[in-house]
Amino acid sequence: MRGYLAFMRGAMLVGVVYRLGFLFTILGNIVYMIIAYFLWRSIYAGKETLNGLTFDQALLYIALGSTIFILLKTYTDWGMAEEIRSGTISVYLTKPIDYQLYNLFGTIGFASTTILTVTLPTVIMLLFVFRIHFALGWGYLFFPVSLILAFIINFNLDYAVGLSAFYTESIWGISTTKEIIVSVLSGALLPLQFFPAAVQQVLMVLPFQAMFFTPLMMVTKPDQQAGVFLQMLVVQALWAAVTYAASRLFYNQAIKVLRVAGG
Amino acid sequence: MLTLGEYIRLYFLIETQYIKGQMQYRADFLISSIGMFFSSLATLSIFVVLFNSIPSLAGWSLMEMVFIYAFYMIAISPMQILFDAVWFLRMKVQSGEFVKYYFRPMNIMFYFMSERFDIKGLTQLAAGIVLLVYASIQLDLVWSVGKILILFLAVFSASLVLISIAVMAGSSAFWVVNSYPVLALAWKVREFAPYPITIFDGVFRFAFTFILPIGFIAFYPAQFFLRPAEISPLFYVTPFIGLGLFALTYKIWELGVNSWTGTGS
């Protein structure tokens, strides 16, 4: 366990090297929020609610959604693909290290720097600059757990995409396709309430809603009964377990095709 | 120095070799092309879903938005296909490999950009053309030879704006080395180009027209074909904005190339 914590620390330190990068990421998120504000203002065009969401709720949903998107974008799949393509993966395979856990802890390390440098400043800005109204409710208590579960599901997907490098060597295509499918079907770009009822029913049985829609609902509509949130968490936990098992199975298959040239 | 004809011949030679090299990643190429197609579809599906709940966006109908978006897809293709190398500048600058571009008797920007030719961008171009034709049929737009020529000029100008924004962001690598966050920022902002610039007011409309000129990527040019009656005078300056921005970008690139000191390796 201590070994894995060292990987986490290492990833954090690597993250801090590019301090200037955070500045641009924060700036990018600010520009995004300004554009989102105007876009959603003209979408609402004076209407009180749309599909059960007020303008404030929709804006909070979109702004926080983009912040979580940055948090979950850890480039784990890219790092893995590079290790697999170049053959450095053999370093980890010959040591008593679980490759999935090694990557998980590295990803947690990377994400912790993002929380401090991008997520917190953004949330502070939402509170004081955009003066978004946060309603009170149970949702906030469940949100941290929900975010962790979303993080795990996202990691499992990234890990599976990274593993596909065993077959294709370059993963641009798979990674981009995954990102697009996730951002549309998870409700990261548009609250799922805006989708037609039939489509919504389909989306709710897919794992993607557990990555964005669920944690975002806990903050945009926090004043629901605790039981509702508990049920959401159970669904998320289920998806976390299923995606974990699936990506582990995939690893056992994919590792068989590995060929590393020389040493 | 080489003549234009020699540059063109050279470009074809380099690209042929590059495409041959890329064919070793056949599976990724296939999936990338499909991914490119889906990514175009994603924004479109967001439009369609959104317009389920609202009749119009700042006075623009769904089909008009589809037209603007199709124009945007076409305008972005030259950047995607010909200037994709800009994403890799930071790696070459970091490793010092960039030094090789100084030792050839040809334009450095040409040599550097010619090293990549993004075939999958052709999927996006094709999808954009199909969508533009579809939207203009649905909107009953009347086309003439003159209008088609203006369309070409408008696409050319808009492409220059996009290329300039990306190359400028990428060139920051000469000074800050890791230009990825700068590029990612530019890339994120241009995603909003297909939305009507009229949703912004006051200082922000000014900013997105003149400081971060995303209005010139799709909205101002497309307006000419959609609503010629209420066209903004800014449409006519689009070619000048495009050319001016590209000239500025080239200056910044040259400044970077000249000030880069290498890695010493």
Image (cartoon, grey):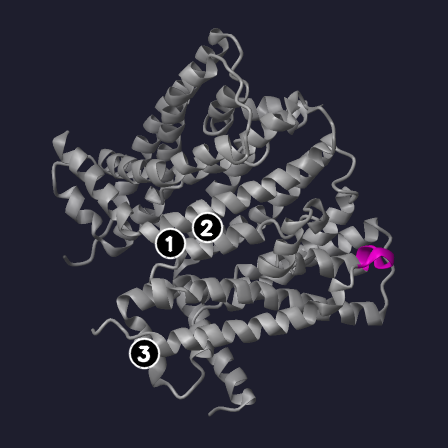
- Asked if residue A35 lies left or right of residue A239, the reply is right
Query: Badge 1 sits on which subunit?
Result: A
Which residue occupies 65% across, 36% down? A40
Q: Which amino acid is tagged 2?
A: Gly
Which residue occupies 84% across, 56% down? B230
- Residue A126's place in the image compared with B158, above or below, is above
User: Residue A191: where, in percent of width, then height?
Assistant: 59, 29
Residue contact at pointers 2 and 1, CB within 8 angstroms: yes
Which quadrant holds residue B209? bottom right
Which residue occupies 61% across, 55% down? B207
Q: Which mark is residue A170?
A: 1
Alpha carbons under labels 2 and 1: distance apart = 8 Å
Query: Badge 3 sits on which subunit?
Result: B
- Asked if residue B21 lies left or right of residue B205, the reply is left
Q: Comparing marks 2 and 3, which lies closer to the viewer? A: 3
Pick the front one: A166 or A118: A118
Query: Badge 2 sits on which subunit?
Result: A
Q: Which mark is residue A173?
A: 2
- Residue A127's place in the image compared with B235, above or below, is above
Which quadrant holds residue A101? top left
Q: Bounds of the magenta span?
A: B225-231
User: Residue B72: where, in percent of width, then height?
Assistant: 65, 56
- Asked if residue B175 lies left or right of residue B202, the reply is left
Residue receiving disc 3: B100
Pick the front one: B88 or A161: B88
Alpha carbons under labels 3 and 1: distance apart = 25 Å
Q: Is residue B120 magenta?
A: no
- Residue A148's place in the image compared with B86, above or below, is above
- Residue A133's place in the image compared with B129, above or below, is above
Q: Quadrant of the N terminus of chain A?
A: top left
Q: Which amino acid is tagged 1?
A: Ser
